[in-house]
Image (cartoon, helix red, strand yellow):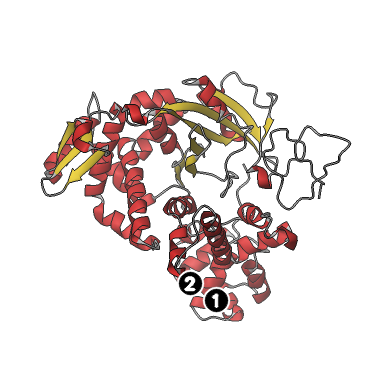
């Protein structure tokens, strides 16, 4: 595959301004012309590997973090979705301006996205009584989701720590027992399975005074193991988790706690499925989720999530994306180890068979899809059960996992499928911003497009619109 070019103009410009340098002075120190530096800062030229080395030597920047971390969260697709809103569509902002904004002014783009997200949330709530209530519109799940995606759902420090710990926790029968022993021997924490009636509406809880960790008897076996790994991660990596949350600078304590829980969940999965060992298993088993579940005592969702994290630069797995939805279409998880055009403010395309998985419960449903930009992806969808078996918590969820078609030949579930000649389903982002004109599944009119409805004819698509 072609290597992605690095357009890092905003980071280069920020570095220069932080050092209080003119373009001429910085260009001289890097051995390039001022005009070339100007092109770099305006993202008209990509940053080369040689220039990254000069930045590392001359300005002490960390190459990996400079080139990858802190990238813009809000891209042109998200901005297109925002400016396609009826409130803004009369501005007619062309896509090239949105691309320039996303690449050259990422903080401004993110600010626009946050304001728009707050507006969408405010439309669901009664009128705000106090100006300070606006803060409540920054929903915790969206903030944390954006933070995780900014880091491509991969945290090297957590991976290293979890791999060291997980590699030492071996048992011929189950990882649950060494997890329990480690909690007891290293931290004096006793783990017990207790009736659900003891916990009320909780599935697990830790009593710090008694150093007692209680897990519901109604949790499924794999989720009990994960609960033990979560509690162990919270104890072993407390300092690291605190620092990571502090560095993220969440806007309030509730979001900070949700982020810490999300990072501890990540660490729990990494302890159960240590990076190097898990990647080797995944490649040997051709990414068979069922085989990986059996190998690591994990469930489908845990393995699917872990597969989206295999982006270590020196040892990359297949770059998967993942969604989890309920029967009503509500998205509760969304991760991507590689770029996938998720709708940030809407749902999923009804033509993607993630939803059809509910009609084929327990079965693996595969599909080749093509997004409007012409990229093709191989996807797998299947239902999963909720973590707890209590009657009131019944009902299925669906997990969708996919990767670029160029990687699909590595997957066990793609065997026997002619990836170059099999039928391909055109899909799009949320209907309100999808550019496909003749889709019979369109649920809403396309924002920013003039409808082409005529009284004397009806089209297959309920909302035909003019091209352009």
Above or below, 107 against 278 in this view is below
Label 1 secondary element: helix
Residue 257, quarter of picture: bottom left
Counting the numbered discs, the total is: 2
Task: In this rendered view, identify the residue nearer to me: 243 or 419.
Answer: 243
Residue named by callout 2: 58
Closer to the chain start, of discs 2 and 1, is 1
Q: Is residue 457 above or below residue 48?
A: above
Task: Tell me the quarter of the image containing the N terminus.
Answer: top right
Which residue appears at 64% of the width and 26% of the height?
419
Residue in the image at 54% along x and 34% along y? 402
State the image coordinates of residue 213 (x, y, percent, origin top left): 18, 40
Name the residue tied to disc 1: 29
Q: Position of residue 203 (x, y in %)?
A: 27, 37
**Which label number is shown at residue 136?**
none
Give the x, y percent position of residue 346: 58, 46
Q: Is residue 167 visible?
A: no
x and y, in percent, of residue 404 in the image: 59, 37
Disc 2 is placed on an element classified as: helix
Q: Residue furthest top?
A: 416
Is residue 394 shown left or right of residue 187?
right
Depth check, front residue: 94 or 152: 94
Q: Residue at x 75, y 37 (%)?
A: 462
The answer to whether marks 2 and 1 mark residues whose Cβ atoms lie closer than 8 Å is yes
Dot 1 surroundings within 10 Å: few (below 14), some, or many (20 or more)? some
Q: Is residue 254 visible?
A: yes
With respect to residue 117, does 357 lie above or below? above
Q: Is residue 140 left or right of residue 379?
A: left
From the viewer's perspective, tell me whether residue 299 is left or right of residue 41: left
Could you give the CA–CA distance between mark 2 and mark 1, rounded to whole angstroms?
8 Å
């Amino acid at each position: 595959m072609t290597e992605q070019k690095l357009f890092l103009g905003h980071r280069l410009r920020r570095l220069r301004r932080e050092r209080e340098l003119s373009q001429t002075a910085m260009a001289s120190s890097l051995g390039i012309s001022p005009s070339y530096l100007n092109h770099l800062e305006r993202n008209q030229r990509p940053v080369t590997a040689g220039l990254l080395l000069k930045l590392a030597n001359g300005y002490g920047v960390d190459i990996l973090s400079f080139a990858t971390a802190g990238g813009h969260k809000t891209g042109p697709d998200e901005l297109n979705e925002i400016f396609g809103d009826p409130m803004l569509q009369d501005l007619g902002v062309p896509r090239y301006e949105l691309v320039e904004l996303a690449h050259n002014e990422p903080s401004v783009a993110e600010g626009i996205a946050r304001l728009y997200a707050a507006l969408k949330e405010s439309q669901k709530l009664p009128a705000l009584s106090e100006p300070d209530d606006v803060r409540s519109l920054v929903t915790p799940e969206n903030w944390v989701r954006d933070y995780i995606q900014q880091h491509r759902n991969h945290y090297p420090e957590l991976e290293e720590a979890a791999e060291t710990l997980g590699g030492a926790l071996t048992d011929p029968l189950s990882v649950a027992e060494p997890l329990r022993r480690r909690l007891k021997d290293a931290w004096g924490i006793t783990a017990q399975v207790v009736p659900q009636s003891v916990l009320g509406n909780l599935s697990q809880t830790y009593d710090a005074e008694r150093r007692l960790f209680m897990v519901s008897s109604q949790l499924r076996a794999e989720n009990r193991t994960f609960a033990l790994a979560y509690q162990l991660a919270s104890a072993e990596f407390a300092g690291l988790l605190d620092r990571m949350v502090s560095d993220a600078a969440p806007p309030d304590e509730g979001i900070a706690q949700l982020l810490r829980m999300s990072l501890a969940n990540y660490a729990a999965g990494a302890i159960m499925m240590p990076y190097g060992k898990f990647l080797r298993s995944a490649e040997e088993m051709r990414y068979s989720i069922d085989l990986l579940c059996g190998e690591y005592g994990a469930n489908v969702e845990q393995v699917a999530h872990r597969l989206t994290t295999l982006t270590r630069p020196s040892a990359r797995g297949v770059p998967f994306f993942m969604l989890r939805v309920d029967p009503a279409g509500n998205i509760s998880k969304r991760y991507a180890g590689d770029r996938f055009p998720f709708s940030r403010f809407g749902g999923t395309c009804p033509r993607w068979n993630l939803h059809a998985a509910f009609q084929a419960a327990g079965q693996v449903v595969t599909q080749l899809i093509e997004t409007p930009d012409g990229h093709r992806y191989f996807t797998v969808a299947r239902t999963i059960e909720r973590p707890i078996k209590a009657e009131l918590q019944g009902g299925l969820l669906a997990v969708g996992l996919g990767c670029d078609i160029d990687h699909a030949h590595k997957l066990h579930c793609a065997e026997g499928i002619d990836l170059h000649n099999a039928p391909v389903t055109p899909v799009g982002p949320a209907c309100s911003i999808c550019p496909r004109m003749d889709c019979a599944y369109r649920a809403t009119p396309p924002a920013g497009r003039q409808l082409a409805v005529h009284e004397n004819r009806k089209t297959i698509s309920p909302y035909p619109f003019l091209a352009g």
